[in-house]
Amino acid sequence: MNEKINILGINGSPHKEGHGVRLLTEALAHSEKEGAETKITHLVDHPMNFFPGEYSAETPKGCDEIFGLLEWADGVIFSSPVYWFSMSALMKNFIEHITTLEECRNFELEGKVAGFIATCEEDGGQKVISDMAAPLIHMGFVIPPYTMLFHNKHMAEKSEKGWQQDDHKLVGRNVARMAKILKDTSVVWGY
């Protein structure tokens, strides 16, 4: 089959340049090496009201374009800075809004592939990845090996075998590879 695959990078930082965006861009470049078409979107460009805690089949205000990008994508790489041991408010609000696609729209995200990048100055990276991954797994995302990277720029050079230096490339590669595998099969994940 070898159909074209699409990988979306979502930047959860309020900044469009910086450490997290650089890692996300490089990860997407490695998705492209696997034959994927890629796009990056910045949540700061999609002003959304805070999630009201109520689900509706209607697309939340400010989510039309980004919901369209999620529909286009076979895989998504989520990138967030660490703020006080948590993901950015932009990313948290976004994940709460896409719950609509699960609760009210018949699990539209089921079978899409996810990867994660969290950037930190001190600590909390692994917690942020877990906080992003947990609801997305429940929404039906598939998470392949080596696609959950936290990157502490102060620790990267000191890490064992320098693993934090290049693992973001594995995130891009493995999200693309899993998306290809799933696109070439007819797996049904839910009921």
Image (cartoon, helix red, strand yellow):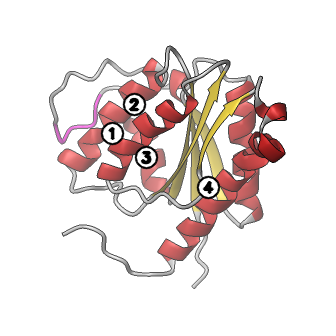
Give SS at disc 3.
helix
Q: Which labelled disc corresponds to residue 68? A: 3
Nearer to the camera, 145 or 1: 145
As rendered, which of 171 and 180 lies closer to the eye? 171
**Quadrant the N terminus occupies:** bottom right
Report, in whole angstroms, how far the alpha carbon at label 3 lies from the one at label 1. 12 Å
Q: Which mark is residue 22?
A: none
Residue at 53% across, 21% down? 44
Taking 185 as reference, is 138 left or right? left
- Residue bearing the label numbered 4: 146
Q: Amino acid at mark 1?
A: Ile
Tag 2: residue type? Phe
> Of the residues tagged 3 and 4, which is closer to the observer?
4
Work out which quarter of the rendered image holds the C terminus and state it: bottom left
**Cα–Cα span, label 2 and label 1:** 6 Å
Task: Report, in whole angstroms, how far the alpha carbon at label 3 lies from the one at label 4.
Answer: 27 Å
Classify 10 Å Cα crowding around label 3: few (below 14), some (14-19), many (20 and above): few
How many numbered tags mark residues here?
Answer: 4
Magenta span: chief secondary structure: loop
Q: Closer to the N terminus: mark 2 or mark 3?
A: 3
**Secondary structure under the numbered disc 4 in the rendered image:** loop
**Which amino acid does the dot numbered 4 rest on?**
Tyr
